[in-house]
Image (spheres, grey):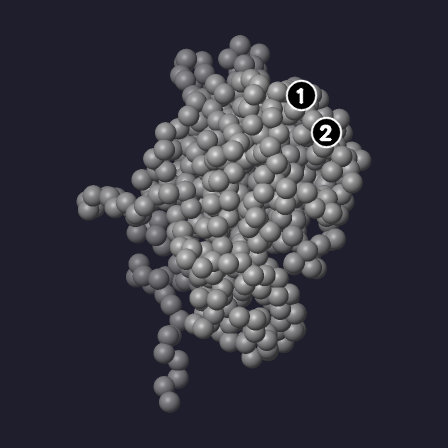
Amino acid sequence: MSTPKITRVLISKLATLAHLSIDEDQIDRFGGQLSDILGYIDRLNRVDTEGIEAISHITGKTLEAREDISTSSFTLKQALANAKNTEKNMFEVANVFGEIE
Amino acid sequence: MDVTKLTIKSALALLSSGETTSLELTSAYLERIEKTNPSLNAFITISKDLALEQASIADKSLKDGKKGKLLGIPLAYKDIFSVKETKMTAGAKVLDEYIPQYDATIVQKFQSEGAISLGKTNMDAWAHGSSGENSDYGPTKNPYDLDKTPGGSSSGSATAVASGMAIAATGTDTGGSIRLPAAFTGTVGLKPTYGRVSRYGIVAMGSSFDSIGHITRDVYDSAYLLELSAGFDPADATSSKEKVMPYTSHIGSSLEGKKMGIIKEFMTDGIEEGVLKNWKESVDTMKGLGCEIVELSLSHIDSAMACYYVLVPAEVSSNLARFDGIRFGNDRSFFSDEAKRRIMTGTFTLSSGYYDAYYKKASKVRSLIKKDFTDAFEKVDCIMAPVSPTVAFNLGERAQDPLAMYLSDIFVCPMNLAGVPALSVPSGTVDGLPVGVQFIAPDFCEERLYEFGSAFEKERGELNLTLKI
C-alpha cells in the first residue's frame, strides 16, 4: 500500500487515540514529519515477504510460566508513593463518564 | 589520583593493596563531577550523600576482608534504571518527581557486589534519540568538543565515563543507544544479546529490542561487568537461561586463522572521509592479527532502518500508554515532541486498517534480517562494522530534522532487529574526535566480542584524545 495522506484530521484522530494533546502548530509540524517518516518506511513494500513468518522473541525464548504461588510485592505505601491524588488508600481518578447527554 | 585514567581493574587493585580507599576514590569522582558537570550536563541526579555513605560501608567491608566483585567501585546509572529511593526521570519531565520504590535487577546485582552509586545520568527522554538533544533536562556535551553531541540516547553515561566522572556507567541499546555514544566519546560500549541481561526495573522503550548494557573505559572492564549482569532473572520472562560465560577469560585470545566478516552493504557513499580512512586502517589491523577477511552480503540490511521505525514506535506507543499521571508521574501533556511523534507513529501503524501493511509486514522483514545474520555467521566467527558514518556532529545540526537524526543509527540498529550482541571499541580519532568500530557476534556469543575487541584494542594502542575540561 502507498503512504496514506497525512491530513490534519488524521493527526487529530491519532492524538485522540493516544491520549495526547496537540495544538494547531504541532498538527502542522507533526503532519510534515510524519509524512517524511511514513514515506521512508514505504520501502518495506519492496521486500518480498511471501511465506515468511514473523518472529516474536528474537533470540529464541518461548513463553515460560512460573509456579502459581503468591509472593510479596509492594506495600500499600510503596504502591501509592508516587500518586499525585489518593484518597483512603486508593488512586483518585478523574470522572470517566463526562457529561451524560 | 587521576580519575580520568582509572579502570575497574586498576581501581580494584588500588583498593586491594590499600593504596586508596573507597571513600578517597568516591570523593575524587564526586569532585570531578562537581567540577565538570555544570559544563557537560552528564548527570541529572548526583547522589553525593548516598555515595559517600556507601563508600564508608565499602571501606569497612574491605577492612573486614569481605569480598565483592565491585566492592568500593563508583558507578553511574543511566536515568532509566530504577535505583530505590533515588529520583528517576528517564530524561523526561513526565517523571520529574518519580521516586522508584525498588531497584532494577542490574542495580541489585551491582550493589550486592559492593558498587557505589554516584548518580543518574542524562539521556534522551524515554531513550528516544541518538544525540542526547531530546533530553527534557538539556543536552549533554561531548567532553572532547563542547559544541558537539556525545551521541545518544545514553549520552550522560558516555560523557561521564569518557571524562572521568564515573569508572563505568550503565546504558540501554534499543537501536544503537550504547554503541553510538561510546563511539562518539572514545569509550567501549556493549550491546549484549537481547535477553542476555534482565530488563526488570528499567523503563521500557521497545520491549522486543531493549538490550541492557554498559559503557566502560576498556574492553576488559566491559567483559568484567557482563559476567556480573548477565543471567536469567525470574522477574524478566524474556531473559535467557543460556549459560553465562567467563567473558574475561577470553580477553587476549589469539585471532590467528579466525574469519572476520565485513558487510558489503555498509560500504556506502555516506561515510565521511576521515571515518572511511580509519575504517580501512581498522580492517588492516585485523588482517595483521591473523584474521581472514570475508566479504558478506546481508541483502535485507538496507531495510533495517525502515523496519525499525515501524516496530519500535509501535512498541513505544504501547509502553508509554502506562504514563497516565494517575499512579505515578505527571500527565501526558508533559510529553515532549519526539515522544509524541513516536507515540503517534506507533499508534498509526498499529491502527485498524494499517496493522497488516505496516506492523505485520515489518515483523516479517525483521525475520529476514535475523536470517541474514544467522546465515552470515555460518561463514564467519565475527563481523566488524563501522558504528557511525560520521564522528560526533554539532549540537543543533540534526535536531530539527527527525529523519536525519534517525539515520545516525544506520549501522547500529540492524543488530537490535536481529537481537545479536555487538561491542563498540574506539578505533582512533578524526580531527581530534573519537571514532569507533563495532564487533558483532551470534546470539549469546559475547565471548567472541571480547576476543576480537581486546585484540583490536591492544593492537590499536593509545588513543590521542584531549579532554576539554
Q: Is residue B390 left or right of residue B44?
A: right
- List x then y, in percent, for residue B77: 52, 38
Q: Is residue B241 left or right of residue B386?
A: left
At 43% across and 22% down in the image, what residue appears? B246
The mark nearer the N terminus, 2 or 1, is 2
Residue B428 numbered tag = none
Query: As displayed, is residue B454 above or below residue B418?
Result: above
- Residue denoted by label 2: B281
- Residue denoted by label 1: B288
Q: Is residue B166 visible?
A: no
- List x then y, in percent, for residue A74: 31, 47
Q: Quadrant of residue B296?
A: top right
Say few, some or many: other residues with alpha carbon within 10 Å of mark 1 (under 14 / 14 to 19 / 20 or more): some
Q: Is residue A76 visible?
A: yes
What amino acid is found at the position of numbered circle 2 in the picture? Answer: Glu
Say few, some or many: other residues with alpha carbon within 10 Å of mark 2 (under 14 / 14 to 19 / 20 or more): some
At 43% across and 72% down in the image, what residue appears? B352
At 39% across and 80% down in the image, what residue appears? A98
The chain letter for the residue carrying disc 1 is B
At 55% across and 24% down in the image, what residue appears? B258
Tell me the SS state at disc 2.
helix
The chain letter for the residue carrying disc 2 is B
Give the quarter of the figure containing the N terminus of chain B: top right
The residue positioned farthest toward the bottom in the image shown? A101
